[in-house]
Amino acid sequence: MALGTDAAAEKSAAADEHDYLFTGEPGDLAADWWVLAACDGQEPEIFFPLSPQDVRAKEKAVAICAKCQVREQCLTTAMADRSLVGIWGGTDELDRARLREHTAGR
Ligand code: SF4
C-alpha cells in the first residue's frame, strides 16, 4: 500500500525525531548500547508504525526486539523519555503508558 503525502511526511518526521538518539551528539541516549541493537538497519516503518492499529508492523518489531541483546537498556530509555514514539524494547507508546501506570500503582 502506497503512503499518502501526509503519511509519508509523518513517517519521515518520526524517523528524524528518532535520529537524535543515534548521532553520538550530546544527549545521545543510546551511544553506549545502540551499536548492539538488533533493529540497526531494519526498515524504520516497522518500528514507527503510523498508527496503533498497524498490528503487523508492531508484531515484526516485537519479534526483532525479543532477540535483541540490549532490549533492557532500550526499554529503560523509552520508559524514561515519554516523548519517544514507536517500538522500543518491544513496547509501543501505549504499552509503556500501561507499564508506567502499573509501576506507579505499586
Ligand atoms: S529492543 Fe528493539 S527497538 Fe530496542 S534496540 Fe533492540 S531491536 Fe531496537
Image: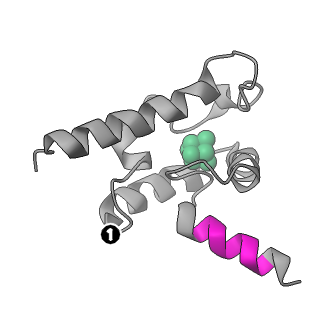
Residue positioned 52% across, 53% down in the render: 87
Instruction: Tell me which colouring the rendered structure shows.
Output: one colour
Q: Residue at x 70, y 42 (%)?
A: 70
Magenta residue span:
95-102
Image location of residue 44, percent across then percent down: 39, 38
Image x and y of residue 29, in percent: 74, 32
Few, some or many residues within 10 Å of mark 1 (<14, 14–19, 20+): few
Along the line of sight, the residue nearer the viewer: 1 or 68? 1
Kind of residue sitting beneath label 1:
Gln
The residue furthest right is 106
Q: Residue at x 76, y 51 (%)?
A: 80
> Given the current orientation, which residue lies at the most extreme bottom position?
105
Q: Please give left or right for residue 32 compared with residue 37 in the image.
A: right
Residue 50 falls in image quadrant = bottom left
Question: Measured from the top left, where is residue 61 in percent x and y?
Answer: 45, 53
Q: Which quarter of the figure is the C terminus placed in?
A: bottom right
x, y percent for residue 48: 41, 48
Q: In this rendering, would 37 be left or right of 32?
A: left
Query: Relative to 39, does residue 54 appear above or below in the rendering?
Result: below
Q: Main secondary structure of the magenta part?
A: helix
Badge 1 is on which residue? Answer: 53
Q: Above or below — where is 34 with respect to 102?
A: above
Quarter location, residue 28: top right
Q: Quadrant of ligand 1?
A: top right
- In the rendered image, the residue lying farthest to the front is 6
Q: Nearer the viewer, residue 9 or 70?
A: 9
* Mark count: 1
Q: Judge from the rendering whether residue 59 lies leftward or rightward of residue 36; answer left or right.
A: left
The residue lying at 65 percent from left, 75 percent from top is: 98
